[in-house]
Image (spheres, rainbow, N blue to C red):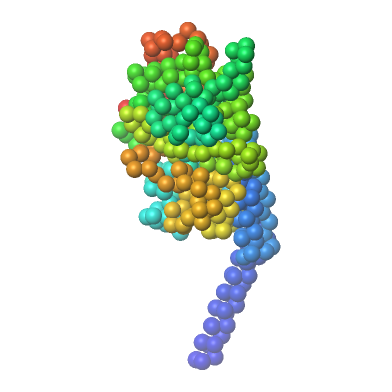
């Protein structure tokens, strides 16, 4: 009897060793590819590889990072064919789009528990990392805009503090713009997003949300339905607000000027709204610019945009378990700190204190601390997101060029109605429309 028990134990041990060895060999020799949606993700992903390799020294991890539009095009061309990377780092709108198409794998049970652990992530993360109630991504980073302003330019104009309201922002923009002797603008008071229609929609909405108290695409009553929210006076007023700064006596921005972070770093822009990645960008590219960062200006409402990027694993991947393990390693505190300090993006985790990062660079504060009275909003999880934001942006940016809309609220009403009708048609075509 003892001999039989002994033999049984030996067989169990051998089976366990063979199983463990097989698993170790499979994981150890696995090769996975990781694609990131921003070039500034190189350093944090390199750190994730370093941590991952400590436990999997024989593994191979290839990381490729892209500019956002190149990334979107690459994923669109390869993911439906099952040829994308093993780990794809994409925003919540793409997560919804590819989950709806059946391209993303459902997260393992332990990852699902991580996503839904109260307090681990910002409150919206479980929804934005899930599709139809099932986690399909692991939250990585995000963050919305704040107002970057050149302190020296404000001081020259006799302005002692940054603008707090949309009306203030308009007044400051006019005062801070600068012209040469021929009357040509040489400095934008406020940099308006004039190119890139999808991003242009988003940045236009930074103003519309404060007037409207909602975004220009809203959730319908039924799950996974949405409707256009542009056909209203407030959206027209927001369009007029921008048109007045591009034409007429208050002209304070122009297509000929440098824009966005590049313009701000070159001293050609006094103010603009952008995310926290601009902080390390300025440190590298314009260390001598004396600038501050303030909360996004408010109006009747105070709505601050936020955003979420997930690590997702395609269903077609041949190394899904290894890919999910790498996604888990991306959550490591060391990786999160490199992400924050090097890329400037805000980690989605909220169970880690980043007080040392904020202490070293206090200008991160408006991005990590929510001001009292402000409402954080996220864009909807529509699978037709890219087409929606692009088409609306094209209409808005075309209207920016129309000087005939100056002081023409009824004309602006016609523009936003057109945008609204097109948005609703896109939603109907994708079977996502519902009020």
- The percent position of residue 309, horizontal first and vertical second, equals 51, 43
Direction from residue 410 to residue 332 in the image, left or right: right
Q: Residue at x 57, y 74 (%)?
A: 16
4 versus 280 height, above or below: below
Residue ranking furthest to the top: 404
Q: Which residue is drawn at 41% across and 36% down?
A: 304
Residue 205, by quadrant, is: top left
**Nearest the eye: 68 or 99:** 68
- The percent position of residue 40, horizontal first and vertical second, equals 62, 43
Direction from residue 386 to residue 70 in the image, left or right: right
- The percent position of residue 117, horizontal first and vertical second, equals 39, 56
58 versus 74 height, above or below: below
- The percent position of residue 190, horizontal first and vertical second, equals 51, 26
Residue 280 seen anywhere in this rendered image of the structure: yes
The quarter of the picture where the C terminus appears is: top left
**Nearest the eye: 376 or 16:** 376
Q: Residue at x 64, y 64 (%)?
A: 54
């Amino acid at each position: 009897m003892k001999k039989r028990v002994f033999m049984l134990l030996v067989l169990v041990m051998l089976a366990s060793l063979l199983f463990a060895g097989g698993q170790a060999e499979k994981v150890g020799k696995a090769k996975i590819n990781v694609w990131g949606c921003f070039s500034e993700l190189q350093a944090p992903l390199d750190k994730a590889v370093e941590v991952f390799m400590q436990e999997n020294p024989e593994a191979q991890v290839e990381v490729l990072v892209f500019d956002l539009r190149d990334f979107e095009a690459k994923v669109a061309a390869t993911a439906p064919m099952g040829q994308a990377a093993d780990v794809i780092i994409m925003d919540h709108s793409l997560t919804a789009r590819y989950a709806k198409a059946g391209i993303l794998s459902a997260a393992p049970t332990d990852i699902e528990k991580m996503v839904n652990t109260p307090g681990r992530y910002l409150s919206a993360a479980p929804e934005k990392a899930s599709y139809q109630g099932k986690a399909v991504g692991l939250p990585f980073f995000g963050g919305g805009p704040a107002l970057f302003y050149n302190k020296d330019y404000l001081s020259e104009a006799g302005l002692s503090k940054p603008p707090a309201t949309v009306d203030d922002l308009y007044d400051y923009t006019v005062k801070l713009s600068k012209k040469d002797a021929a009357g040509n603008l040489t400095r934008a008071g406020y940099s308006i997003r004039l190119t890139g229609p999808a991003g242009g929609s988003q940045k236009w909405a930074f103003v519309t949300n404060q007037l409207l108290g909602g975004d220009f695409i809203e959730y319908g009553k039924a799950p996974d339905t949405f409707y256009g929210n542009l056909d209203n006076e407030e959206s027209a007023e927001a369009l007029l607000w921008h048109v007045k700064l591009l034409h007429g006596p208050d002209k304070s921005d122009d297509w000929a000027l440098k824009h966005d972070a590049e313009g701000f770093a070159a001293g050609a822009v006094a103010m603009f709204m952008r995310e926290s990645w601009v902080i390390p960008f300025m440190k590298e590219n314009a260390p001598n610019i004396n600038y501050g960062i303030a909360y996004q200006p408010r109006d009747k409402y105070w709505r601050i945009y936020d955003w979420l990027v997930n690590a997702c694993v395609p269903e077609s991947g041949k190394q899904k378990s290894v890919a999910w393990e790498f996604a888990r390693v991306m959550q490591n505190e060391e990786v999160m700190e490199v992400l924050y300090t090097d890329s400037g993006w805000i980690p989605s985790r909220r169970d880690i204190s980043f007080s040392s990062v904020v202490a070293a660079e206090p200008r991160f504060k408006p991005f990590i601390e929510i001001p009292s009275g402000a409402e954080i909003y996220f864009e909807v999880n529509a699978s037709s997101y890219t087409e929606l934001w692009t088409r609306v942006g094209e209409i808005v940016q075309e209207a920016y060029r129309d000087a005939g809309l100056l002081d023409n609220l009824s004309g602006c009403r016609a523009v936003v109605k057109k945008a609204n009708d097109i948005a609703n048609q896109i939603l109907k075509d994708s079977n996502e429309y519902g009020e």
